[in-house]
Image: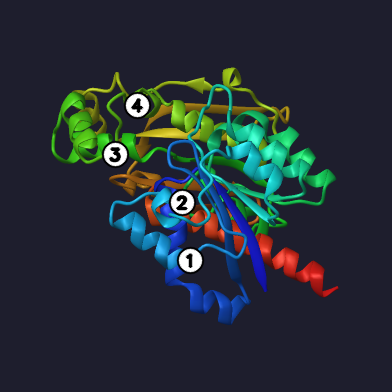
């Protein structure tokens, strides 16, 4: 069965998604009957590319890997650079919109507008964009439910490491009491280097920047804003809360010294930037992001480098800990693939009725 897909925002993650489609085309078709038809791609910088018959994924990957751009695919063909993202959403006939524009945690734009417009046009949504989900999840979920549409958000917290699909598919009828974890790989890398190699905070940050883990302006990572957005999503999506950014206590890692880390290690503890959300005795949801000293016996303590991890405290299973990459081209592309395949299965099931 063919499924029509349009992509808004095409960067590293978009490329990862296409590579997965190309690499796994045979098994996706044979095992799931999944035949993707990419009918449009729109990017603010790279322009727009439209082919109602479906873009040649192998050709597009080859062009991009050789340093080309979207316009190089469609010379004399289907390139319409004058069409913006809203034009694409309104005019293109597709089943799924994949929204992968840049994250704005302050306004959620332009992604929120894209998602709302897609729902109005009857399209399912898949996104790795934290902004809309952190700020407007309940409103967007209501729009989707009213139209019997799905909104895939697996990539918004731990990239391709499953969180929402895990909870939705395998945890019922567990009640989740608390979620805590390492939600930012950059800070975890910095703290790991400070402990294992005795680096100062400044030296470890420079190393993270040299490797591409941290941006030139690392504020979002080291001051806990990235982790805060993810805690906000966990709070409102999984725990059923209605928190705002200002409801979450936030503290970064910039005040932690090498001496602090050495002293903690002497006493059997390791510093981690921990995002946490739980229900208190009054059923109120409490959330925070702050550096904590974790005992060596805690599974989160052993998570090193640019890796993320979450521990779910449940009533039936006790503690369940998962860990995996929290970023990366193929890793986040995989999160998009998970959600696209889930939506495809729903559409396929409905059409067979």
Q: State if disc 2 and disc 3 touch (CB < 8 Å).
A: no
The residue singled out by tag 2 in the image is 14
Q: Earlier in the sequence, mark 2 or mark 1?
A: 2
Which of pointers 3 and 2 lies earlier in the amino acid sequence? 2
Circle on res. 56? 1
Please provide percent x and percent y for residue 346: 73, 64
Q: Which is more N-terminal, label 3 or label 4?
A: 3
* Identity of the residue furthest to the bottom in this view: 30
Label 1 crowd (10 A; few <14 / some 14-19 / many >=20): some
Mark 3 lies on a secondary structure that is loop
Mark identifier at residue 213: 3
Pick the front one: 285 or 93: 93
> Looking at the image, which is closer to me, 292 or 182?
182
Identify the mark at residue 222; answer none if there is no mark.
4
Image coords of residue 88 (percent x, y): 63, 44
Give residue 195's position: percent from left, percent from top.
20, 36
Q: Quadrant of residue 261?
A: top left
């Amino acid at each position: 069965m063919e499924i029509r897909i349009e992509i808004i925002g095409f960067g590293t993650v978009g490329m990862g998604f296409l590579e997965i489609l190309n690499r796994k085309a045979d098994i996706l078709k044979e095992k799931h009957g999944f035949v993707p038809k990419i009918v449009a791609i729109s990017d603010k910088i790279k322009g727009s590319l439209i082919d109602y018959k479906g873009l040649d994924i192998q050709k597009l990957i080859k062009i991009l890997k050789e340093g080309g751009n979207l316009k190089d695919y469609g010379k004399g063909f289907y390139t319409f650079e004058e069409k913006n993202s809203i034009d694409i959403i309104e005019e293109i006939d597709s089943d799924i919109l994949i929204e992968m524009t840049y994250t704005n945690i302050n306004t959620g734009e332009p992604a929120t507008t894209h998602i709302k417009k897609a729902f109005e046009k009857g399209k399912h949504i898949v996104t790795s964009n934290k902004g809309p989900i952190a700020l407007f999840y309940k409103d967007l979920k209501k729009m989707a439910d009213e139209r019997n549409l799905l909104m895939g958000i697996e990539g918004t917290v731990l990239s391709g490491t499953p969180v929402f699909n895990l909870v939705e598919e395998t945890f019922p009828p567990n009640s989740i009491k608390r979620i805590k974890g390492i939600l930012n790989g950059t800070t975890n890398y910095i703290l790991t280097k400070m402990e294992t190699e005795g680096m100062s905070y400044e030296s470890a940050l420079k190393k993270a920047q040299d490797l591409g883990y941290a941006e030139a302006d690392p504020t979002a990572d080291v001051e806990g804003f990235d982790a805060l957005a993810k805690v906000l999503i966990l709070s409102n999506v999984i725990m059923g809360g209605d928190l705002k950014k200002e409801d979450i206590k936030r503290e970064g890692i910039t005040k932690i010294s090498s001496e602090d880390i050495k002293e903690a290690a002497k006493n059997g503890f390791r510093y981690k930037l921990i995002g946490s959300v739980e229900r208190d005795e009054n059923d109120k949801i409490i959330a925070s992001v702050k550096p904590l000293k974790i005992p060596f016996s805690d599974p989160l303590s052993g998570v090193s480098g640019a890796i993320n991890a979450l521990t779910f405290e449940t009533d039936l299973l006790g503690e369940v800990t998962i860990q995996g990459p929290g970023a990366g081209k193929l890793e986040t592309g995989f999160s998009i693939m998970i959600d696209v395949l889930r939506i495809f299965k729903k559409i396929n099931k409905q059409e067979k009725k």
